[in-house]
Image: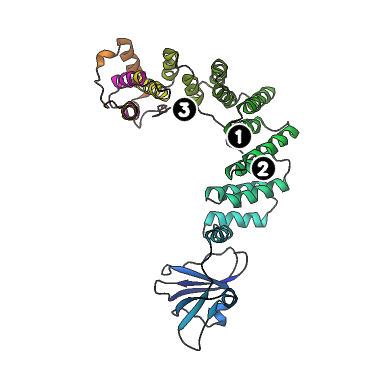
């Protein structure tokens, strides 16, 4: 609450377990034996001589009578509490929004900081993010609007606002406003242009998204910033338009800038299904053969090529018959093609060179999916094209 109130804690039998009179704003009142709470205007409990141990009863009354919230009779310890008729779900949501986070320590501390320094942009954005994380998008939106009003030239505040608006299904006007902002702030960091591209991609405007991703990449180049994710995101937009060769070129550029980029490598492999040998080489460059074949199987499943996918799962299990991702893919395959989840695993299917590669990988990198393995497990049950963005500062 934003003003002082009396807080009356009530137990299972409607007996008063605790009273916090005239509790100040942003404070917390706790009663471990209480089961519900009655909030009253400050001073009501004292005026009606309500004490711990009193037994309360509730009756429905008109809105006019309800303004006198607590009715008492003489020195009796039995009290009658007048309550308003049941409120609608919409009204309850409004009240919950007003009281949002009253018992949350993190939110309470952030609110106190914002109250003490209302012009601090970082604090305002942090509070908005906290409200989003706690499930209060409307309150987050209010704080982002305030942040933009106080800092109209802040690209970060603009980005937080547009993402919050998209989350509450106001994507079209939000994206248009954000695009106009960036047109007037061409000195904004490349990642803000790339975020515009992502928002346009998600809205299905791939062509506009492509242009935004290109703008982000060109700005990074002008600033001598090698940002691999910008090329990966551009490749993603090109791939969505069916321009595979151009997408491959962008994914390869991302890998040139960052050879360890798992997302760019996975995305490149997804464009190489017509060249499974090259796709396999991409996976093997950052994982062992079992993981590489399992990843390739996942991509083939996405394309509906279940027969080829089953062969790749079999190859993966040839290298490691207990490989979890391959076993999951096998189970998924059996659900997709209706065939039994059984494959005869034979080491005869693995060449001598293949066994040598696996032995070398285990020697230097460890066995996959074991605690001592320092290499990341790139295998996913189903592989999809992905984008990557730096977290906003």
Q: Of label 3 and label 1, which has the lower sequence position?
A: 1
Q: Which residues lie in the magenta part?
A: 308-327
Q: Which mark is residue 16?
A: none
Q: Which mark is residue 384?
A: 3
Give the quarter of the image for residue 280: top left
**Left or right: 253, with 78 as reference point:** right
Q: Main secondary structure of the magenta part?
A: helix
Q: Secondary structure at mark 1?
A: helix
- Can residue 254 be seen here? The reply is yes
In the depicted view, which residue is nearer to us: 84 or 350?
84
Report which residue position mark 2 lands on.
157
Instruction: Say which residue appears at 63% left-offset and 47% top-offset.
Output: 125
Q: Of label 2 and label 1, which has the lower sequence position?
A: 2
- Can residue 123 be seen here? The reply is no
Mark 3 → mark 1, Cα distance in angstroms: 18 Å
Q: Of label 2 and label 3, which has the lower sequence position?
A: 2
Nearer to us of marks 2 and 3 is: 3
Report which residue position mark 1 lands on.
199
In the depicted view, which residue is nearer to us: 151 or 70?
70
Question: Tags 2 and 1 in contact by the CB under 8 Å rule?
Answer: no
Q: Secondary structure at mark 2?
A: helix
Q: Residue furthest right?
A: 184
């Amino acid at each position: 609450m934003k003003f002082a109130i009396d807080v009356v804690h009530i137990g299972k039998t409607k007996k008063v377990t605790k009273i916090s009179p005239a509790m100040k704003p942003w404070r917390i009142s706790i009663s471990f034996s209480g089961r519900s709470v009655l909030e009253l205007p400050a001073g009501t409990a004292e005026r009606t001589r309500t004490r711990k141990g009193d037994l309360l009863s509730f009756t429905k009354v008109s809105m006019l009578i309800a303004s006198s919230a607590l009715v008492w009779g003489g020195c009796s310890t039995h009290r009658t509490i007048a309550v308003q008729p049941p409120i609608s779900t919409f009204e309850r949501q409004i009240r919950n929004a007003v009281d949002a986070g009253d018992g949350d320590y993190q939110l309470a501390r952030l609110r106190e900081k914002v109250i003490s320094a209302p012009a601090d942009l970082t604090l305002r954005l942090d509070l908005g993010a906290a409200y989003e994380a706690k499930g209060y998008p409307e309150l987050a939106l209010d704080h982002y609007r305030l942040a933009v009003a106080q800092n109209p030239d802040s690209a970060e505040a603009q980005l937080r606002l547009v993402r919050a608006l998209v989350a509450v299904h106001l994507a079209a006007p939000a994206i248009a406003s954000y695009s106009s902002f960036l047109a007037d702030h061409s000195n904004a960091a490349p990642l803000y242009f790339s975020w515009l591209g992502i928002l346009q991609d998600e809205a299905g405007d791939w062509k506009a998204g492509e242009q935004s991703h290109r703008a982000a990449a060109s700005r990074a180049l002008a600033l001598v910033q090698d940002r691999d994710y910008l090329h990966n995101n551009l490749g993603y937009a090109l791939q969505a338009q069916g321009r595979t060769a151009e997408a491959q070129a962008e994914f390869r550029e991302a890998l040139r800038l960052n050879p360890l980029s798992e997302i760019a490598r996975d995305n490149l492999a997804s464009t190489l299904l017509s060249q499974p040998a090259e796709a396999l080489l991409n996976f093997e460059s950052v994982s062992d053969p079992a993981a590489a074949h399992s990843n390739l199987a996942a991509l083939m499943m996405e394309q509906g090529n279940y027969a080829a996918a089953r062969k790749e799962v079999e190859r993966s299990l040839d290298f490691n018959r207990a490989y979890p991702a391959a076993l999951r893919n096998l189970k998924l395959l059996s659900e997709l093609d209706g065939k039994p989840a059984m494959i005869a695993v034979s080491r005869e299917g693995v060449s001598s060179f293949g066994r040598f590669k696996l032995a070398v990988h285990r020697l230097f990198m460890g066995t996959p999916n074991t605690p001592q393995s320092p290499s990341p497990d790139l295998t996913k049950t189903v592989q999809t094209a992905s984008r990557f963005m730096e977290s906003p500062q």
